[in-house]
Image (cartoon, coloured by chain):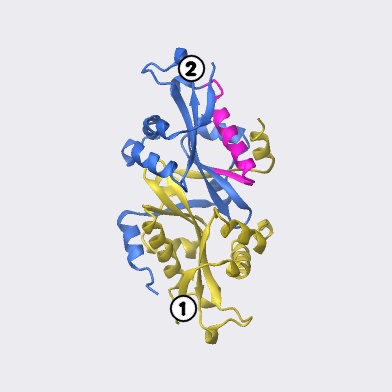
Amino acid sequence: MNFKLRAATKDDCKDISRMITELAVYENMPDQVKISHEELERDGFCQNPFFECLIAEVPEEQKSKEGFTVVGYALYFYTYSTWMGPTVYLEDLYVMPEFRGNGIGKGLLCKVAEVAKKKQCVRLQLSVLNWNTPSRDFYAAKGAKDLTATEGWHFIRFDGQNLDNLVNEAPTN
Amino acid sequence: MDFSIRAANVEDCKDIARMIRELAEYEKVSDHIKITQRDLEQDGFSKNPFFHGIVAEVSEQHRTKDGHTKIGYALYFFAYSSWTGRAVFMEDLYVMPEFRGNGIGKALMSKVAQLGLAAGCNQLNFTVLDWNKSSVDFYLSQGCFNVTTKMGYHCMRCEGKALEDLAQP
């Protein structure tokens, strides 16, 4: 199968938004998606973007059943380790089911790693659901270490009312 | 105890580097530190910084045995959730042991939350080691939740040779 990997443009945000929802459905959390293509356009294509995105595209003759040629994406941003320096965090990696098995997911992951290397990042980090065996196997095969299992790292979050409460207690000096 | 919290500037990097090492010793990983004061100056205070910092300071009369008045810090950067949008990630939160119990850690974390909210973020995220009971208890008491235990997300990392191999065109 022919496919092309390229940087996303603002016009791709509708497709990216569509695929974000598809990925959330796959992860059994479709009601967790709160943002639309408008936020993606604003946050990914402003002067100091919050993220970067790569797109996988197939030619017209290989478009999906519904007529889509944008069939996969990788959304990532730059982070920092106070131990090691700049890192890349891969927020999402997704290929539409009918296009899997053609090396598109691997291609996207490698492209993100290439970007990381160009920016002198020393780590590529991501998170994966513990029950998602195909994805865990995919990443493990590429040499990723599970830091939760091996070192005991847990993700912690403040959001909603709890975040507001925390903000209200910030010092005023 | 009186203390103040302010944005870090490039002159603070020496103290931040010192406290990063102290935090790494506490987390039992001090041999992993590759970052120097110079790296922090370049990475945090250039045109497109990789991170932002805030520093907690006490007055001269409360300085440490070694003469330090900068006794805590938090390092954060902006992240993104493809489900909920802008987020802030707190990479480090640290208060020197002799200054704990005075609300400084809480004040630093609240300030990061406030700065995040001001930038349009609706999540404050960070990681903690599961054996670090005092930190886990502190965070839970402040109202956060554990995404790993509640939703099943595991942190994964590619580095070194694995990352090199992946980056081959």
Please state the chain letter of the residue tagged with numbered disc 1 in the rendered image: B
How many neighbours does mark 1 have within 10 angstroms: few (below 14), some (14-19), or many (20 or more)?
A: some
Q: Quadrant of the C terminus of chain B?
A: top right
Q: Is residue B12 visible?
A: yes
**Which residue in the structure is indicated by mark 1?**
B3
Q: Position of residue B166 (x, y in %)?
A: 64, 34
Question: In the image shown, does A61 or A22 lie closer to the viewer?
Answer: A61
Q: Is residue A128 left or right of residue B32?
A: left
Q: Which mark is residue A121?
A: none
Q: Position of residue A111 (x, y in %)?
A: 58, 33
Colour assigned to chain B in the rendering is: yellow
Is the residue A126 above or below the residue B109 in the image?
Answer: above
Is the residue A84 above or below the residue B167 in the image?
Answer: below
What secondary structure predominates along the stretch shown in magenta?
Answer: helix
Is the residue A109 above or below the residue B81 in the image?
Answer: above
**Amino acid under label 2?**
Pro
Magenta range: A101-125
> Residue at 40% across / 75% down in the picture?
A173
